[in-house]
Amino acid sequence: MTQVVQLEDASKLASREQLMGMLQEAAEVEHNLMLTYLYAAFSIKTEESEGLTAEQGKTLKTWRRSVIRIAVEEMGHLALVCNLLCAIGGTPHFGRLNFPIAPGPLPAKMSVRLRRFDQDTLQHFIYLERPECAQDIEDSPPFRDIYDYHRAPIEQSRLMPVAMDYPTVGALYDQIVETFEVLCEKYGEDHLFVGDASRQIGPDITPLPGLCVINNLRDAKVAVDVIKEQGEGANAHSETSHFKRFCRIQAQYDAYLDEDPTFDPARPVAENPVMRSPPTPEGKVWVTEPTAATLMDWTNALYIKMLRLLSQAFGRRGDAHEKRILVNAATDLMYAMTPAAEAMTHIQANGDTDRTAGMSFATIRNSVAPLPIGTEWRVFACRFNEITEAGEDIRGISDAVDASIDMVARIAETFIREAEAIIEAKGEDTES
């Protein structure tokens, strides 16, 4: 009789390769959630001139800060997953598909799209962050995919890694822990945790909440607990979890709607904006208005630069000082792009829609894998110069955009100065 491997006994598929595949999927989940939260936060109105009362404006600024903080914690979750990958001899995973993501690459119940902040988007966030005890919470209609797709159960054991279905993100992490336990019991911790710990990013490098270095099974369980308690799969009674924070925003949102049914907390931002004409245009908005398109190009360049810096820091053996330079620049860029990304939501996307533009967080075909050691400082410095020069060309769009340009210029200046010092200390030519 054919054996069907269900989620609850999927440990029969346990292997290092399978574990790496599960962790890579978890990395993509965390990465995508971080970006969808940022996109929604950038769309939130903050000024009375946008039709808000003074009280509403104050509340929405609080919502925006809260959603951005949650996105930063998702960045911490991504860092923890990358540490888990490095701990078992793998490499960090920063790859992801462009938005919107069709059914299949992620679990059947996870729809990933860029959408402005409204009731449906907030309900979707609550659905994504729901704990195991709240599986009856449903996704909002715009995020329920038209395809009734499920990853089929696996027949017999497989040598190739298998992507399984799971009801919640927390269930994926439960399976990851179970696979860690099975492999440790089967081979021993020394056999599984073969990665060089100096390749990971710890709290000595960046103060992301809950970040830790992983050397053994206990450390791995602590890392997963941090991820689950902060957000996905969190205890329903944890007041600081992402789930609870989104629920509190929902309660305030409902109260405002009771007072005023026309209350709308966000600008009319396009769903799934794209930089170029899409081959499948359904569900996407092509941003062609010149100012918006130029600004989208520049902010997306900042996003890719951020990924390259993170990728270079993770999996890198050696000097903590050099890692800190890379991670600090990456983190600073995320904050620097925020004013420009929000400014974009005030600009019409194209002549065929009344929707405004937004960041697409476009990925690129060439990999963001680490550059060869010894060349990275020159390559990164050169790209920083290109980005700052392009920033000067768009100066004057708005005060917010100018603020982003100034912040990026300072980040670039600091990075290039530190890069030149490193090159000089190593006795290399600083000309590039």
Image (cartoon, helix red, strand yellow):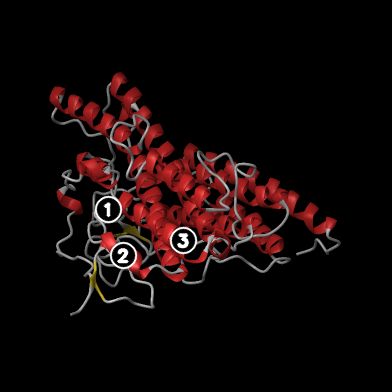
Mark 2 sits on what residue?
A: 10
* Residue at x 29%, y 55% (from the top left corner): 113
Q: Name above or below for residue 410 compared with residue 101.
A: above
Of the two numbered discs 3 and 2 on the same chain, state the one appearing first in sequence.
2
Q: Nearer the viewer, mark 3 or mark 1?
A: 3
Foreground residue, 384 or 255?
A: 255
Circle 2/circle 1 CB separation < 8 Å: no
Residue depicted at 37% across the width and 37% down the height = 67
Marks 2 and 1, how far apart in space?
37 Å
Asked if one can make out residue 20 in the rendered structure from this viewpoint, the answer is: yes
Asked which quadrant contains residue 249, the reply is: top left
- The residue under the point 83% across, 64% down is 429
12 up-or-down from 224: above or below: below
Q: Mark 3 to mark 1: distance in Å?
A: 47 Å
Tell me the quadrant of the picture where the C terminus can be found: bottom right
Report the disc number at residue 271. 1
The answer to whether 305 appears left or right of 253 in the picture is right
Report the disc number at residue 7: none
Secondary element at image label 1: loop
- The quarter of the picture where the N terminus appears is bottom left
* 10 with respect to 344 (left or right): left
Q: Amino acid at mark 2?
A: Ala
